[in-house]
Image (cartoon, helix red, strand yellow):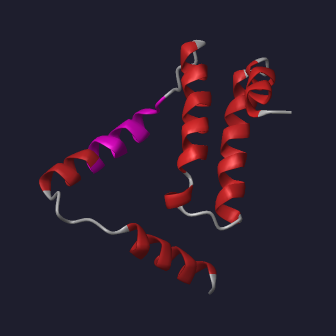
Amino acid sequence: MDLPSVLREVDAWPVEDRMLLVQQLWDRLVDQGYEPGIWKDLRDELQQLWDRLVDQGYEPEIWEDLRDELNRRVAADEAAPDEVVSWEEVKAEALKRTRR
């Protein structure tokens, strides 16, 4: 079965099941060692799936505490845009933590 056929089939699923599929696909990719540099095609496909959900009326609920945290992070980034951590540093730290 080709990808467009799979997507048409998935479109018939309930929104909650489609969101779970997206999350599980992403987790599997990470578990299999994929890195962001080679995820472009998959990210594009996942973005298409997300866009379809939104086009079909899915509006994710953002809880007040999550909204507050996102606003805090945006404000912190705007206040100090040069204080960043590279993907390589994040990955190395995550791998270090999982090996403990």
Taking depth in this image into account, of 43 and 96 the one nearest to the observer is 43
Q: Position of residue 59 (x, y in %)?
A: 52, 20
Q: Quadrant of the N terminus?
A: top right
Q: Nearer the viewer, residue 3 or 88?
A: 3
Taking 26 as reference, is 83 left or right? left
Give coordinates of residue 96: x percent, y percent.
54, 83
Which residue lies most toward the bottom here? 100
User: Farthest residue toward the front?
Assistant: 2
Vertical comparison of 13 with 25: above or below: above
Quarter of image, res 28:
bottom right
Q: Residue at x 80, y 33 (%)?
A: 2
- Residue drawn 55% across and 63% down? 35
Of residue 3 and residue 26, the one placed in the foreground of this image is 3
Q: Give residue 67's position: percent from left, percent from top.
A: 37, 36
Start-end of magenta stretch: 62-73
Looking at the image, which residue is at 73% across and 27% down? 4
In screen coordinates, is 17 left or right of 52? right
Query: Left of 14 or right of it: where is 41?
Result: left
Majority secondary structure of the magenta segment?
helix
Asked whether 71 or 19 is in front, the reply is 19
